């Protein structure tokens, strides 16, 4: 198909998807180019091309290693407290709750504490202001500018049209810089994402055990083209700042949306909600209030709730890869010219009964892709999943959710 002047090849066969995302990564390393008015947006890992991405990914990936995630659990447990209190008060008053906004504030709390070592209590006005700016940043641009940005990027750049509302970016830059300044004056060193970004501005070091663990994502099976991330290299100030802002914005939006979707589905299916509540009650009774990563890993039903929510309502409806060279798609004989986009329709594949149906005992590889796959999968997916499971266990044991007359 053509989207404006851009040729797009849609691929939904699992074996071909595997080629596109994993085995032939070096031929299809980038995403669709998006024009931005603000140069800092082009520094974010989600939008950079291969050369810059190979520099950024090894610098950021150690923050999401298993050992680091395990240490984040006390902070995540602490972050959900304000949300539970708010829900209990709303339940006592029998009032409706906008769960999207509520969980946006929780996600902000969790990210601020785990990644930046700072508290941003979700009931404060400053956070409400942050929430409004965050929402407007990711809101769809005006119809015309949005279409031009995606379909005619060269024209959009000429006219200085933005795919995102980047006039809000200075707010997030100031916030991130403020947190960094505060950190520099602290005597105690913290092991979190912010410290990692500050460190890689100042020194060049070989990637350690955490980076080696992450490297296994890049060669997940024999037969794939060799691809190594190599050594971690120092980042510029703007590169490090861009990753901090990206974590704030994208992490919060993804986590909040998934939590809202999960609660929405549980409200529509009270029998599933009751089953999850039973699992949560038994878990807290046995292990106490402070959940650990090892305890949550054994809970099958909450994992199933999150997985099914991601299947039905994935964060993105499709993945895209840009051909860096002329490319032949497997043994199909289909020639993909340089500059062509290959699109993988996640939402459609997640709802295809051939791949995921009632009578299918196991999910076929590369048909379930809520966070993508291969080297350019979502770097923060594990953090998001852990934060979401903890939140669900706490809120479902505390209150019962019903659909209201305003539920769509």
Image: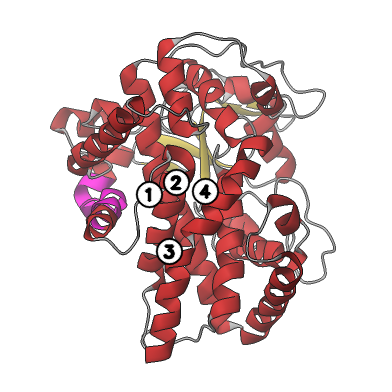
Residue at the image position 46 percent from the left and 9 percent from the top: 203
User: Which of the pair 319/41 is nearer the observer?
Assistant: 41
Give coordinates of residue 402: x percent, y percent: 50, 86
Does the residue at mark 4 contact the one at mark 1 (Cβ under 8 Å)? no
Q: Say if 175 sits above or below 242 in the image.
A: below
One can see residue 33 in this view: no
**Mark 4 or mark 2, earlier in chain:** 2
Q: Mark 3 highlights which residue?
A: 103
Disc 3 or disc 1, which is closer to the eye?
1
Which numbered disc covers residue 119?
A: 1
Give coordinates of residue 241: x percent, y percent: 34, 28
One can see residue 148 in this view: yes
Give the SS element for disc 2: helix
Quote the CA–CA distance across marks 4 and 3: 24 Å
Does the residue at mark 2 contact the one at mark 1 (Cβ under 8 Å)? yes
Which numbered disc covers residue 113?
A: 2
Task: Bin the neighbour count of mark 2 within 10 Å (Cα to Cα): few under 14, some 14-19, many 20 and up.
Answer: many
**Mark 3 or mark 2, earlier in chain:** 3
Segment tinted magenta in the rendering: 132-146
**Mark 3 or mark 1, earlier in chain:** 3
Q: Mark 4 highlights which residue?
A: 318
Give the SS element for disc 3: helix
């Amino acid at each position: 198909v053509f989207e404006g002047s851009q040729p797009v090849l849609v691929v939904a066969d699992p074996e071909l998807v595997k080629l596109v995302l994993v085995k032939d990564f070096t031929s299809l390393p980038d995403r669709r180019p998006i024009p931005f008015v603000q140069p800092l947006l082009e520094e974010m890992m989600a939008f950079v091309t291969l050369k810059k991405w190979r520099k950024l990914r090894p610098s950021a990936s150690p923050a999401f290693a298993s050992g680091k995630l395990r240490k984040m659990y006390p902070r995540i447990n602490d972050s959900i407290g304000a949300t539970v209190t708010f829900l209990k008060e709303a339940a006592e008053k029998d009032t409706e709750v906008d769960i999207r906004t509520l969980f946006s504030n929780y996600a902000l709390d969790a990210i601020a504490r785990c990644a930046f070592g700072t508290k941003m209590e979700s009931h404060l006005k400053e956070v409400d202001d942050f929430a409004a700016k965050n929402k407007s940043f990711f809101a769809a641009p005006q119809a015309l500018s949005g279409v031009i940005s995606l379909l005619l990027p060269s024209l959009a750049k000429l006219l200085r049209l933005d795919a995102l509302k980047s006039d809000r970016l200075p707010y997030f830059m100031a916030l991130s810089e403020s947190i960094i300044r505060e950190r520099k004056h602290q005597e105690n060193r913290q092991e979190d994402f912010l410290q990692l970004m500050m460190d890689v501005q100042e020194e060049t070091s070989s990637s350690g055990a955490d980076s080696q663990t992450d490297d296994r994502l890049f060669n997940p099976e024999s037969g794939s083209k060799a691809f190594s991330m190599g050594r971690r290299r120092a980042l510029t100030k703007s590169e490090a700042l861009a990753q901090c802002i990206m974590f704030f914005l994208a992490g919060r939006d993804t986590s909040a949306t998934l939590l809202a979707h999960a609660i929405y589905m549980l409200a529509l299916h009270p029998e599933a909600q009751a089953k999850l509540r039973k699992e949560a009650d038994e878990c807290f009774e046995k292990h106490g209030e402070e959940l650990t990563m090892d305890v949550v890993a054994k809970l099958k039903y909450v994992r199933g709730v999150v997985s099914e929510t991601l299947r039905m309502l994935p964060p993105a409806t499709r993945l895209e890869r840009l051909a860096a060279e002329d490319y032949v798609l497997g043994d199909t004989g289909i020639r993909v010219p340089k500059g062509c986009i290959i699109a993988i329709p996640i939402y459609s594949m997640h709802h295809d009964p051939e791949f995921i149906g009632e009578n299918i005992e196991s999910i076929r590889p590369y048909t379930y892709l809520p966070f993508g796959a291969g080297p350019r999968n979502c770097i923060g997916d594990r953090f998001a999943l852990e934060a979401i499971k903890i939140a669900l266990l706490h809120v479902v044991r505390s209150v019962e959710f019903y659909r209201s007359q305003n539920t769509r």
